[in-house]
Amino acid sequence: MNKQKNQILFLAAVIVLGILYAYVQYLFIPEWGVLKQKTAQVSERQAYLTRMENSYKDFSALKQQSSSLKAQVSVLDKKVPKKLDKPDIMLTIYNLAKNNGLSPKSLTYEPIKDEGQYLTMGMNFSCTGPAENIYTLVDQFLKGNKYIFALDSISFTSNKDGSTANMRIVAYAYKP
């Protein structure tokens, strides 16, 4: 009986090892591969989700920045003139000079230049009066009022009546 018991135990061990081998070979190892593949997919999806969240945050920031820039454009659109009206520019410059106690002498225009998205027009302006008033006039040109001006050059000459200033001013406007 001892021999028969050993044979039964051996047969049971072979059957258990066979079932265990079949389980590992046909069920566990394929599922392990699927598990690894699914884990890699989950990691990839999480990385993609993180990228999308960061992109959404960037998109939100860009959207806010875009709305802010649109508001700035609308403000500048109201400030910057759409055309360079020579008589109106002349009145603006002469009024600024008179308001600062200066005596305008001459104003000559250069041709209007197309600079792509905007137009420029150079002008030569001369006036006489106290030097401090001329500095104030230049400051008012640069601060801009009805038109956007840039001071290209200025030259002073002093005499007993005050100072004479010859300026080259550039006016800017959006291209219509």
Image (cartoon, rainbow, N blue to C red):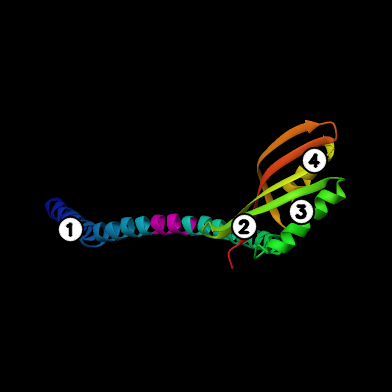
Q: Which residue is mark 2?
A: 65
Mark 4: which amino acid? Ile
**Image location (x, y in percent) of residue 137:** 79, 45
Cβ atoms at labels 4 and 3 below 8 Å apart: no
Residue at 51 percent of width and 57 percent of height:
55
Q: Which residue is mark 3?
A: 93
Looking at the image, tell me whether mark 4 or mark 2 is earlier in sequence order: 2
Q: Is residue 174 magenta?
A: no
- Mark 2 vs mark 1: give the one in front: 2
| Badge 4: residue crowd in 10 Å (few <14, some 14–19, many ≥20) | many
- State the image quarter where residue 71 is shown: bottom right
Mark 2: which amino acid? Gln
SS class, disc 4: helix
Quadrant for the N terminus, please: bottom left
Q: CA distance from mark 3 to mark 1?
A: 104 Å
- Mark 3 vs mark 1: give the one in front: 3
Q: CA distance from mark 4 to mark 3?
A: 12 Å
Q: CA distance from mark 3 to mark 2?
A: 37 Å
Looking at the image, tell me whether mark 3 or mark 1 is earlier in sequence order: 1
Q: Which residue is mark 1?
A: 18
Mark 3: which amino acid? Ile
Question: What type of secondary structure mainly makes up the magenta span?
Answer: helix
Cβ atoms at labels 1 and 4 below 8 Å apart: no
SS class, disc 2: helix
SS class, disc 1: helix
Q: Is residue 49 magenta?
A: yes
- Mark 3 vs mark 2: give the one in front: 3
Mark 1: which amino acid? Gly
Q: Is residue 149 left or right of residue 4?
A: right
Does residue 27 lie above or below 134 as drawn?
below
